[in-house]
Amino acid sequence: MGVRGRSPVRDYILILIGASIMGFAIKNIYDPIGLVTGGASGVAIILKKQFGVPLWLTNTAINIPLFAAAAKLKGWSFIKRTLLATVTLSVSLYVIPEMPFLMDDLFLTALFGGLITGAGAGIVFACQATTGGTDMLAAIIRRWLPHYTLAQILQVLDAAIVLIGAGIFGVTYALYALIAIYAVSKVSDGIIEGMKYSKVAYIISDKSEEIAAAILKELERGVTALDARGMYSGNRKNVLFCVVSRKEIAQLKELVVGHDAQAFVIVSDAREVLGEGFIEYRQ
């Protein structure tokens, strides 16, 4: 199961869009200037520079054995969405026309390449997929090196590719590649976390029963009453605990004030909420 209201078909469409965005950035921003940011795409750029091998062909050739190994070790359910993303990336590298831009400015190339790639990657990651390559290889290697995290293995693989790119295109390009890598990580993380963020509200009011009923009816959100005692007054009362989406928090505050203008409300961020009505567990 995914997020409530989001079907697998929608996820597959988003994967197609995200992988295509990545393909555009790789072909028309990174490749023309020789910016190697790691991954299978970085290897593809290196091989195109050295031997003239098309980007799409290298990306496909690298991923075929990786997917075969991953399917054998982890099963079809592990790779099916990533397979769609990887195939889409290879197809986009083949069919998207070459129209390079930002050729005269390394900084803008690294920055906007990272922003665009990060947007595409974030969409793909949010749909529980990757575009294969070093991500898949890291998952396979970790089977034999379980004491290392997936992120640590991935960092070593991508760093090795960036260093090879530095030897071919120059250290300056490798340093600018670090800017692109940073931008990719920040944008993709922002997209992923942005889909998970919710708001937590604690409501202290003498009209907690009315407010709870209104939340249940009007927002259709669950609410829990916590038994509390004021340490100054010694009075016992209910503290309502409620988790809502970011877009619902304004409506929640209006609802509370409408029932009790003197209510005490505390609102904080929840980085990730799992359960019915939010992000549901995947089986």
Image: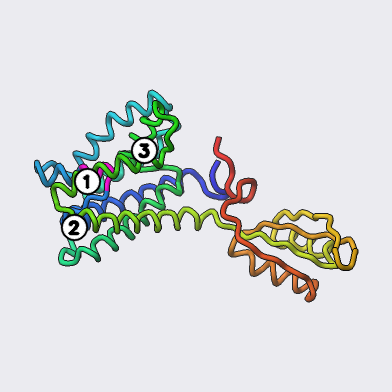
The three-letter code of the residue at mark 1 reads: Leu
Region of the chain picked out in magenta, as a range: 38-43
Q: Secondary structure at mark 3?
A: helix
Residue at the disc numbered 1: 163
**Residue 74: % across, % down:** 43, 27
Residue at the disc numbered 3: 153
The three-letter code of the residue at mark 3 reads: Ile
Q: From what the image shows, is residue 146 above or below residue 263?
A: above
219 with respect to 66 (left or right): right
Q: Secondary structure at mark 1?
A: helix
Bin the neighbour count of mark 1 within 10 Å (Cα to Cα): few under 14, some 14-19, many 20 and up: some
Q: Label 1 vs label 2: CA separation? A: 11 Å
Q: Confirm or deny contact between disc 3 and disc 2 (CB under 8 A).
A: no
The three-letter code of the residue at mark 2 reads: Thr
Q: Is residue 156 magenta?
A: no
Residue at the disc numbered 2: 172
Colour scheme of the picture: rainbow
N-term-proximal mark, 1 vs 2: 1
